Amino acid sequence: MLRRKIFPVVALVVALWAALAAADPALAIWTDKTRLTTTPESEEYPRVAAVGCFVHVVWIDLTNRELHYTRSTDAGATWSTPRTLTTSPPGLPVIQAEIAVSGQRVQVVWQQGANDHASIHHRRSVNRGRSWRSPQILSAQGKASEQPTLAVDRGGAYVAWIQTRRGSDTKPVKLFLTRSANRGKDWAAPERLDRRSMGLSAPRLATGGGRLHTFWGRRVNVDGTWTLEILNRSSTDGGMTWSQRARAVEGSWRPSSVAVDGDTVHLLWDDAQYKLSYVEYQRSHDAGRTWSAPQRLDEASFASLGVSGDRLEAAWIRDWDGIGSLFYSRSRNGGRTWPIRRQIARTGRFPALAVASGKGQCGGAAHLAYGRNWAQDGLSFQEIYYKRNPKILP
């Protein structure tokens, strides 16, 4: 009797999933996971960028705290041998990195060192990652500069970070940005974008529609009450002048991911309440001046977002009882609704998602890199894995 009851339920679940996959076939055709790293060290914090069939991934190894890079020239089917982009002096580890690409130019920034010894470094390739120019230091000497973010367009490159005075954890922090008008070769002196605050979260940069957008979280004391907010500014002249600060979110200060399509800006942010974390989504159709009401996507964190016209792709980590599961969702109507949510990996950490720009066979494909724990011979490792959607390119 029990088996007779179970079989109809299983059949119903299969039928419902088939109907959902038929409504949005791409949800059912992620590639199998590909392991990008094979070293005995633990690897973490991947970042990904893609143009056409070229996909670029960087990550940090947790043993030597170096930054590593690999690329695919066939939309993720095969990958180059990983190479090291940094040589960290003793005591100056790589802590955070970002990657961006425009055409053949690949740009990478990272934080090297911590606390009083933290600085922002940059390196670029002009031939799709085959070779790399020498590193440059972008932040001012004598300052503690942390949590860099990076954006590029056809003509320029932009890097923002937060900065504190050395020797004190209680000094106000500031938001700085530097820009390059020749695609990362030379850089302007850093410019302050926000006045002093007792707390700033990691900024986010994005370009699109002829504008540069910057987002950051801020913790301020107003009449004795601490207030959290996510602010944004935009520039139409490559960062030379900026709009006034606008508040995108009130009550939270952690922007997770930003994607831009024309005048439409899409924002994912973390809403941490009562030891829980939620992924929230908002959009602006007027380049960040006004915003839609928040939509809660999931009880999760570490969200990453990509956009191609009205199609949005998002991935995040749902952490239940200490086990991080990798989830994915898609909106086909510019973020108005997110009808389907699907688990695509049982374990995952720090996902990074990019939708390939450009037209042709590979344009519009979603590329996802993430960390994953695994065990062998009684030892535990963290390695970098990769998936693509769709599995079969047109």
Image (spheres, rainbow, N blue to C red):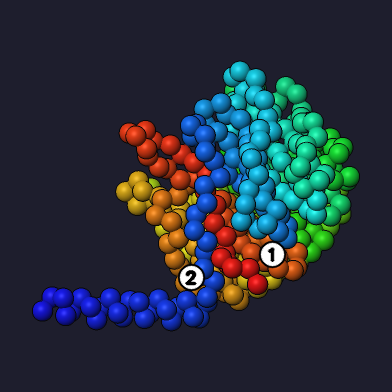
Residue located at (71% from left, 45% from top): 150
The amino acid type, in three-letter code, at marker 2 is Ala
**Label pair 2/1, CB-CB below 8 angstroms:** no
Task: Give the numbered dot on residue 362.
Answer: 1
Binning the other alpha carbons within 10 Å of mark 1 as few (below 14), some (14 to 19) or many (20 upward) gives: many
Q: Which mark is residue 112?
A: none
Q: Residue at x 37, y 37 (%)?
A: 376
Residue 389 point in image, percent of width and height: 57, 64
Give above or below for 370 relative to 335.
above
Whole-percent x and y of residue 130? Answer: 76, 42
Location of residue 160 with respect to 341 vertically, above or below: above
Q: Is residue 133 above or below residue 93?
A: below
Front one among 245 and 335: 335
- Does the image show residue 355? yes
Horizontal relation, residue 368 to residue 73: left or right: left
How dense is the environment of label 2, judged by Cα within 10 Å: few (below 14), some, or many (20 and up)? some
- Residue sitting at 62 percent across and 52 percent down? 78
Q: Quadrant of the N terminus?
A: bottom left
Does residue 256 sit above or below 309 in this rendering?
A: above
**Residue 202 placed where, x, y %?**
61, 43
On the question of residue 251 being in view, the answer is no
Q: Position of residue 128 (x, y in %)?
A: 77, 48
Quarter of the image where the C terminus is located: bottom right
Query: Which residue position holds label 2?
Result: 28
Q: Is residue 48 left or right of residue 24?
A: right
Q: Nearer the viewer, residue 251 or 20?
A: 20
Under mark 1, the amino acid is Cys
Residue at (35% x, 52% y) in the render = 320
Give the secondary structure at mark 2.
helix
Badge 1 element: loop
Q: Which residue is more in the foreground, 100 or 334?
A: 100
